[in-house]
Image (cartoon, grey):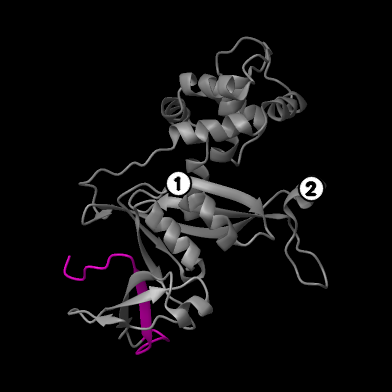
Amino acid sequence: MSARSLLGLLQQPTTQRVAALKRIIPLSAVQRALEQSGRAARHCPVLPLWLVVWLVIGLGLFARDSYRFIFKHLQPFRPGATPRSNTIAAARLALGLLPLRLLARAVVKLLCEPDTPGAFYKGMRLVAIDGWVMDLADTQENARLFGRPGSGRAPGAFPQARVVALCETGSHAFWRHLVKPCRRGETKMAPYLLAQLEPGMLLQWDRNFLSFKNVTQVLARKAHLLARIKSTQVVEPTKELADGSYLAKLYRTSHDRKKDRRGVVVRVIEYTLNDPNRPTKGKVHRLLTTLLDAEA
């Protein structure tokens, strides 16, 4: 069986997958989200909103199938005809976004236990933040809300949304996320997600996220950081450590650096990659961490 055929089977709404959806996102949680959002009062005997919630999630899980086909799998024994596509579309508009946001916050949890392989480092839960862009349906409304990429000569083929997510690396759980128009930079979206960090987490991110403000926000959450450093980032050693790393300070501005005021102490680890097949063989790379004790 080809990989494409296997992917198609995984996206089909089988009885087992539908049962798993209803087990992981139980009806009680769906109804609670509807009540919290003020949508629970809406009544439609053919397509109640609690069923619309499952249907919207099913549209993402079983993306290769039609609205009506997915509905039949969610409610195989429901009396009456399957709603028409325009009825389903109207119900989705009536549902709105807020119940789904509340439901995601309620049911998406950190999954790893302390004994989960690769999920913790010295008692710290490993998490990571990163961003990407996602193609959307080519509609005027999506283009208005999210924008299109492209140069000055022509817009892109599809509207795009920028997504930044905070994930548990051991399970790949999509723990917290933020969606904005594609013109928004991921570094400006990061503070919202950094505010979700919990004490004892070890956060990893790529070099574009590194800034004085973001590092101080991680520390304020009683979490720790392991991050790549741009080659242009100034981190002058203040103390050499026994393992070859060194302490340095991050400053909000270059003026603060000159005056040596309001600096945050960090630890810098330098290393090289000796794989002859890598184009960066022999180049010095740098990591920054808020874990200052090299021995520990």
Disc number at residue 139? 2
Q: Is 260 drawn above or below residue 117 in the view shown?
A: below
Q: Secondary structure at mark 1?
A: loop
Across and down, in percent, residue 274 comes to 30, 86
Residue drawn at x 56%, y 23% as measured from the top left: 36
- Tell me the amino acid under the disc marked 2: Thr
In 3D space, how far apart are the residues under numbered discs 2 and 1 (Cα atoms)? Answer: 33 Å
Residue drawn at x 48%, y 23% as measured from the top left: 29
Magenta segment: 277-296
User: Which of 121 and 224 lies nearest the eye of the viewer?
Assistant: 224
Asked where in the image residue 65 lies, by quadrant, the reply is: top right
Across and down, in percent, residue 42 comes to 68, 15
Answer with left or right where residue 116 lies relative to residue 63.
left
- Tell me the amino acid under the disc marked 1: Gln
Answer with left or right where residue 192 lies relative to residue 46.
left
Q: Which residue is mark 1?
A: 196
Mark 2–mark 1 CB contact (< 8 Å): no
Count neighbours of disc 1 (C-alpha within 10 A) and say few if under 14, some if 14 to 19, many if 20 or more.
Answer: some
Number of numbered discs visible in the structure rendering: 2
Q: Is 292 drawn above or below residue 21 in the view shown?
A: below
Answer with left or right where residue 169 lies relative to residue 182.
left
